[in-house]
Amino acid sequence: MTIKEASLYFNLGENKMHRIANEYVDSDYKFVVQNGGRTMIKRKMFEDFLNQTTSI
């Protein structure tokens, strides 16, 4: 899903989603996918990340 779709789905702001995506793009969490210039979020993997995280 796109950053905009993810922000609506997870009830987070678009800027926050961009910051999270940029921070975790090269981490062990593999929920961020770069498709050319577009940043995409893998929904299920991001949900798993949120379940393990105490604050964002």
Image (cartoon, helix red, strand yellow):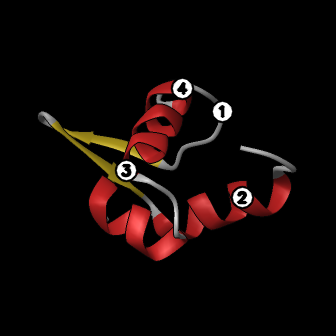
Q: How far apart are marks 1 and 2 (CA)?
A: 14 Å
Residue 11 pos. (x, y %): 52, 69
Amino acid residing under circle 3: Glu
Q: Give whichever of discs 2 and 3 has the lower sequence position.
A: 3
Camera-side mark, 3 or 1: 3
Work out whether mark 4 precedes mark 1 in sequence or the reverse, and give the earlier one: 4
Q: Dot 1: within a 10 Å radius of its alpha carbon, few (fewer than 14), some, or many (20 or more) residues?
A: few
Which numbered dot is residue 23? 4
**Helix, strand or loop at disc 2?**
helix
Q: Quadrant of the C terminus?
A: top right
Q: Write the residue at 65% across / 33% down.
A: 28
**Element assignment for label 4:** helix
Q: How far apart are marks 4 and 3 (CA)?
A: 14 Å
Viewer-proximal residue, 14 or 43?
A: 14
| Mark 3–mark 1 distance (CA, rounded to whole Å) | 22 Å
Counting from the top left corner in percent of width and height, residue 26 is at: 51, 24
Return the residue at label 1. 28
Residue 3 visible in image: yes
Tag 4: amino acid: Glu
- Alpha-carbon span between mark 4 and mark 1: 11 Å
Tell me how far mark 4 sits from mark 2, CA to CA: 14 Å
N-terminal of the pair, mark 1 or mark 2, is 1
Q: Looking at the image, which is closer to me, 15 or 47?
A: 15
Q: Is residue 31 above or below residue 37?
A: below
**Disc 2 designates what residue?**
50
Amino acid at dot 2? Leu
Residue beneath label 3, please? 14
Q: Is mark 1 on a helix, strand or loop?
A: loop
